[in-house]
Amino acid sequence: MSDATRLVVLGSSVCLAMMFLLWLLHLRMRNAAVVDVGWTAGLGILALLYAGLAPGWPVRRAMVAIIGGLWSWRLAAHLVHRVANEPEDGRYQEIRARWGGNTKLKFLFFFLFQGIIDVVLSVPFLAAALNGEPAISPFEFAGVALWVVALAGESIADRQLRAFKADPANKGRVCQAGLWRYSRHPNYFFEWLVWCAFFVFALGSPWGWLAIICPVSMLYLLLRVTGIPATEKHAVQSRGAEYVEYQRTTSVFVPLPRKSA
């Protein structure tokens, strides 16, 4: 069995076991948003696992552990705070209502599928951790630079939204402060940039080009599936005319100047 196959099998087992345990927890909490915590934590675990066990150059493996682990830790901590202090995300409320009966079993498959997605999206970490070339390539320097910008942007957007929600006077209102004035979903935009950074970083390693699946998949999911569409639908229902006006004046994804009134 090759090193890559061995690591993928081990990583898959870890992610699926974790997602099963989180599924059991979600039954107790009745909050499916814990799957987001698991999805994020799973990728960080895979980055650390590959960095620790792969035979690549130790310096590069340390870089994999840092960029994968820090991103995962920050986002997972943010999501844990949200799950613990807010009602179940509107996306999952809508899914629960749409599925109707037998939701426990359906959510089990949903949770396990997120674990499989983790393994697929861990390609940039695996490719880099297997690379034994004892030198940092320009792609890896560029990837780390983009990662710093993206992580900072996502952190700022999350902090601005959390501060807005913490003020009781803003209950039921639309956050339009800071980055949220220029994009309706700046957190999603910078999250996508993180995945672009992982792809650029992976280009410095053999087979790293396979990591193109990461930014392409994330862009599709954010724009068409579980990200923006469900979030926007819930926002219109809960915030009404103010959010409709926000949609008219503000870019949906990329931060841009606002349209005039």
Image (cartoon, rainbow, N blue to C red):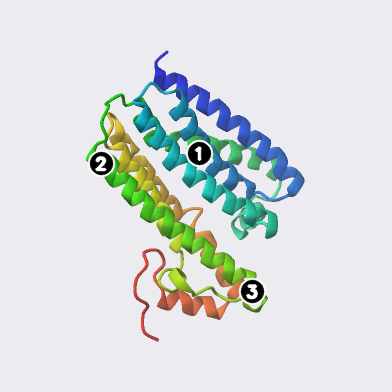
Q: Earlier in the sequence, mark 2 or mark 3?
A: 2
Separation of marks 3 and 1 at Cα, in angstroms: 32 Å
Q: Write down the residue under mark 1.
A: 44
Q: Measured from the top left, where is residue 146 in percent x and y?
A: 33, 51
Q: Image quadrant of residue 198?
A: top left
- In the rendered view, does 209 fall on the left or right side of 154? left
**Could you tell me which secondary element the residue under label 1 belongs to?**
helix
Image vertical order of residue 31 relative to residue 246, above or below: above
- Residue 34 percent coordinates (x, y): 64, 47
- Residue designated by label 2: 139
Contact flag, marks 3 and 1 (Cβ < 8 Å): no
Residue 223 shows up from this direction: no
Outermost residue on the right side: it is 28
Q: What residue is pinned by disc 3? A: 167
Quadrant the C terminus occupies:
bottom left
Q: Is residue 105 left or right of residue 191?
A: right
Task: Judge whether residue 75 can be spotted in this image.
Answer: yes
* Left or right of 126 in this view: 100: right
Q: Which amino acid type is shown beneath numbered disc 1? A: Gly
Q: Residue at x 62, y 34 (%)?
A: 18
Whole-angstrom CA distance, mark 2 to mark 3, is: 43 Å
Looking at the image, the residue that sits furthest to the top is: 1
The residue type indicated by label 2 comes to Phe
Element marked by disc 2? helix
Q: Rounded to the nearest whole Å, what is the CA distance between mark 1 and mark 2?
A: 21 Å
Picture coordinates of residue 49, whole percent (x, y): 49, 29
- Report if the CB atoms under discs 1 and 2 are less than 8 Å apart: no
